[in-house]
Amino acid sequence: MNFPGFVMVRKTTVTLSESVSKTLKVYTVQTRNSMHAQSKVVEEALRDFFERRNVSIEQ
């Protein structure tokens, strides 16, 4: 069922090295003022990653 303006959000689990995890946390707090914004930072990074490799993101 589709609802106008509704975006499906899915959760996933990733394993990060300690150094990358720590950097993500520090960056997120410094730039977003919240630990809860980590998903947004990771999604932006993945979008950039795919774009640089000419991989289209399915809608």
Image (cartoon, rainbow, N blue to C red):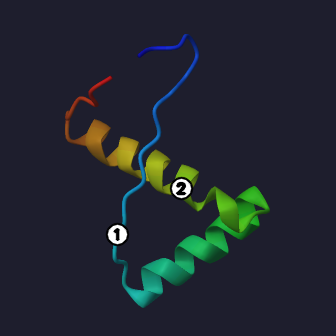
- Write the residue at 38% across / 41% down: 47
Q: Amino acid at mark 2?
A: Ser
Tag shown at residue 39: 2
Q: Is residue 34 above or below residue 11?
A: below
Q: Residue furthest top?
A: 4
Question: Which residue occupies 63% across, 69% down?
Answer: 27
Distance of label 1 from label 2 (alpha carbons):
11 Å
Question: Where is the C terminus found, in terms of image quarters?
Answer: top left
Q: Give me the disc on residue 44.
A: none
Q: Secondary structure at mark 2?
A: helix
Q: Residue at x 37, y 49 (%)?
A: 46
Residue 42 appears left or right of 34: left
- Check disc 1 and report the residue beneath it: 14
Q: Amino acid at mark 1?
A: Val
Q: Is the residue marked by circle 1 packed among few (<14), some (14-19), or many (20+) residues within 10 Å? A: few
Quadrant of the rendered structure where residue 18 is? Answer: bottom left
Of 20 and 40, nearer the camera is 40
The picture places residue 21, in percent across and down from the top left corner, at 48, 79
Closer to the chain start, of discs 1 and 2, is 1
* Disc 2 residue crowd, few under 14, some 14–19, many 20+, Cα 10 Å: few
Image quadrant where residue 32 sits:
bottom right
Residue that sits furthest to the front in the current view: 1
Left or right position of 53 against 23: left
Identity of the residue furthest to the right in this view: 33
Q: Is residue 46 left or right of residue 42?
A: left
Residue 55 drawn at (x, y percent): 20, 35
Viewport quadrant of the N terminus: top left
Residue 4, image x and y in percent?
A: 55, 10
Q: Where residue 56 appears, x then y in whole percent?
A: 23, 29
